[in-house]
Image (cartoon, rainbow, N blue to C red):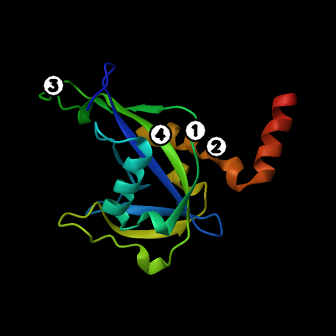
Amino acid sequence: MIDEDGYRPNVGIIVCNKHNQVLWAQRAQHDSWQFPQGGIKCDETPEQAVYRELMEEVGLLPEHVEVLGMTSDWLRYRLPKRYLRHGNKPLCIGQKQRWFLLRFIGKEEDVKLDQFEKPEFDNWRWVDYWTPAQEIVFFKRRVYEKALHELAPILFPEYKKRVESQRKR
């Protein structure tokens, strides 16, 4: 499903633990790391897509997480020209994403990367909340930064106070 502007609707999923570290996953057979994410099907809401993608990509079920928040609007990124599939109609030029912040309330063994024949990820780890914005592939960096900054006040009350005091200046 591609919208009229050429963007594929998608969800981005930030799973944090009790120490406010985030789940960072390595793409199968690649050296790149990212948050779980995936497309929203025609017949599902963004929240339904979160739970489906979470189960498909990292094996987590709704009872393993609680939703803490989501971005207020769609965040968009364009794909570099080399990744465009000009043979596909309509042409997808990028993704528009709704980002969700989830608290992990399961056990570490609940994370299962091998639930399907072709796993999306083959490794994962907990990292500092801000690490993904520095490590993600260049064309997704601004979206990661925006999502992390918008959702940070939910986990870090002092961050919210600092941002508010900067706005008053």
Residue 53 spot, x, y in % from top left? 35, 55
Residue 113 spot, x, y in % from top left? 32, 70
- Which marked residue is nearer to the observer: mark 2 or mark 4? 4
* Residue drawn where x is 56% and y is 39% of the image: 71
Contact between marks 1 and 2 (CB within 8 A): the answer is yes
As measured in the structure, the alpha-carbon distance from the residue carrying label 4 to the one carrying label 3 is 24 Å
As measured in the structure, the alpha-carbon distance from the residue carrying label 1 to the one carrying label 3 is 30 Å
* Mark linked to residue 146: 1
* Mark linked to residue 149: 2
Residue 140 spot, x, y in % from top left? 44, 41
Q: Is residue 96 left or right of residue 154?
A: left
- Which marked residue is nearer to the observer: mark 4 or mark 1? 4
The furthest residue to the top = 4
Contact between marks 4 and 3 (CB within 8 A): the answer is no
Label 4 vs 1, first from the N-terminus:
4
Residue topped by disc 4? 98
- Which marked residue is nearer to the observer: mark 1 or mark 3? 3
As measured in the structure, the alpha-carbon distance from the residue carrying label 1 to the one carrying label 2 is 5 Å
Label 1 is placed on what type of residue? Lys
Q: Secondary structure at mark 1?
A: helix
